[in-house]
């Protein structure tokens, strides 16, 4: 369900129904942003995101992994997972010309349902025509 108290026009947050008032609920946020890359330059986009994540995790006790694939809709998809001792975050970047959609999962409980929901959102995402 949408966590309206935490959502903005730029970023929508979701939590599992019944857990919206938990101290640290698993949650998924979705936002669309702009970048300077065409979709056929997606590897440069990936490298820029990877550099940013490496800087953010420097000095932390966390493992960063990544992979590339396609969504069910055929869009380029980069998935980055940061696994810490008490939290896992997974960032799904769907890439298009000069824009991206970021689906960001924050998983405190390690529940598979949260991962499945985030992956389903990535796979069902369709760009609106401008």
Image (cartoon, helix red, strand yellow):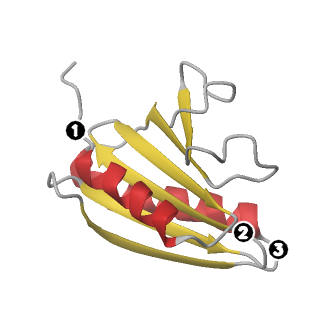
> Looking at the image, is mark 3 or mark 2 earlier in the sequence?
3
Q: Earlier in the sequence, mark 2 or mark 1?
A: 2
- Could you say which disc has been placed on residue 60 in the image? 3
> Residue shown at 78%/71% (left/top)?
58
Residue 45, visible in the rendered structure? no
In percent of the image, x 23 and y 34: which residue is there?
A: 127
Residue displayed at 50% across by 37% down: 1
Q: Residues within 10 Å of mark 2 (few under 14, many from 20)?
A: some
Q: CA distance from mark 3 to mark 1?
A: 35 Å
Query: Residue 15 at x, y = what percent?
Result: 58, 45
Task: Tell me if 69 is positioned left or right of 112 in this view.
Answer: left
User: Where is residue 62 shown, x and y percent of the image?
Assistant: 73, 78
Element at label 3:
loop
Q: Nearer the viewer, mark 3 or mark 2?
A: 2
Q: Nearer the viewer, residue 103 or 68?
A: 103
**Badge 2 is on which residue?**
87
Label 1 environment density (alpha carbons within 10 Å; few <14, some 14–19, many ≥20): some
Q: For the residues marked 2 and 1, what is the alpha-carbon distance in whole angstroms?
A: 29 Å
User: How many C-alpha atoms fall within 10 Å of the one at disc 3: few (<14), some, or many (≥20)?
Assistant: few
Image vertical order of residue 111 relative to residue 119, above or below: below
The answer to whether 84 appears left or right of 3 in the picture is right
From the viewer's side, name the closer residue of 52 and 19.
19
Give the numbered dot on residue 9. Answer: none
Q: Secondary structure at mark 1?
A: loop
Marks 3 and 1 in Cβ contact (< 8 Å):
no
Q: Is residue 94 visible?
A: yes
Task: Tell me the element at label 2.
Answer: loop
The image quadrant that residue 69 belongs to is bottom left
| Left or right: 38 in relation to 3 | left
Q: Position of residue 122 (x, y in %)?
A: 33, 52
Return the mark for residue 126: 1
Residue 88 occupies quadrant: bottom right
């Amino acid at each position: 369900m949408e966590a309206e108290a935490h959502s903005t026009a730029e970023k929508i947050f979701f939590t599992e129904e019944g857990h919206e008032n938990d101290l640290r609920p698993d949650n998924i946020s979705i936002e669309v942003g702009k970048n300077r890359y065409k979709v056929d330059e997606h590897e440069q986009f990936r490298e820029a995101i990877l550099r940013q994540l490496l800087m953010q995790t420097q000095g932390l006790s966390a493992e960063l992994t990544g992979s590339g694939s396609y969504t069910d809709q055929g869009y380029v998809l980069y998935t980055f997972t940061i696994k810490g001792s008490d939290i896992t975050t997974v960032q799904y970047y769907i890439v298009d010309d000069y824009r991206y959609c970021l689906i960001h999962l924050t998983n405190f409980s390690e529940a598979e349902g949260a991962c499945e929901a985030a992956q389903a959102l990535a796979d069902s995402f369709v760009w609106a025509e401008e």
